[in-house]
Amino acid sequence: MRTASLDVRTLSSLLGVPRVGFVVPKYKQSGVARNRLKRRLRELIRLEVLPGLAPLDLVFKVLPVAYTRNFETLRAEVLQAVRRIAR
């Protein structure tokens, strides 16, 4: 599943609990920008996704355009992707 700034892969979890991972390549960005993006994504997942997530393994691969997105746009894309996967 792909959104404008994320590529999301999913598998059923063998452990029976949801797990989420991130792949955030540098794409010629600074370490500060990369860590900021990872913190934003982790917070979105922690607050909005994990409480209602079925036992799945999710991996979010960030595309270069994600570095320019604000928090609300990232939030909308993450929620859109998780809703599509949940169906």
Image (spheres, grey):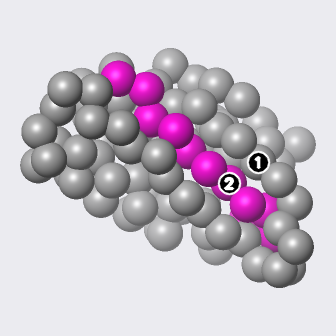
Compute the Cα span from label 1 to label 2: 5 Å
Query: Cβ–Cβ below 8 Å for labels 1 and 2?
Result: yes
Residue 83 appears anywhere in the view: no
Check if residue 53 falls in the magenta segment.
Answer: yes
> Magenta region: which residues?
52-64
Residue matched to label 1: 10
Task: Determine crowd level at label 1: few under 14, some 14-19, many 20+ residues with C-alpha closer than 10 A.
Answer: some
Q: Position of residue 17 (x, y in %)?
A: 77, 78
Q: Secondary structure at mark 2?
A: strand
Q: Residue at x 83, y 80 (%)?
A: 15
Q: Residue at x 44, y 35 (%)?
A: 62
- For the C terminus, give its image quadrant: top right
Q: Position of residue 12 (x, y in %)?
A: 87, 60
Q: Is residue 42 above or below residue 17?
A: above
Q: Is residue 41 found left or right of 22 in the rendered image?
A: left
Residue matched to label 2: 58
- Give the amino acid type for the residue marked by disc 2 in the picture: Leu
Residue 15 appears anywhere in the view: yes
Image quarter of residue 84:
top right
- Judge by depth and name the residue closer to the eye, 55 or 11: 11
Check if residue 39 falls in the magenta segment.
Answer: no
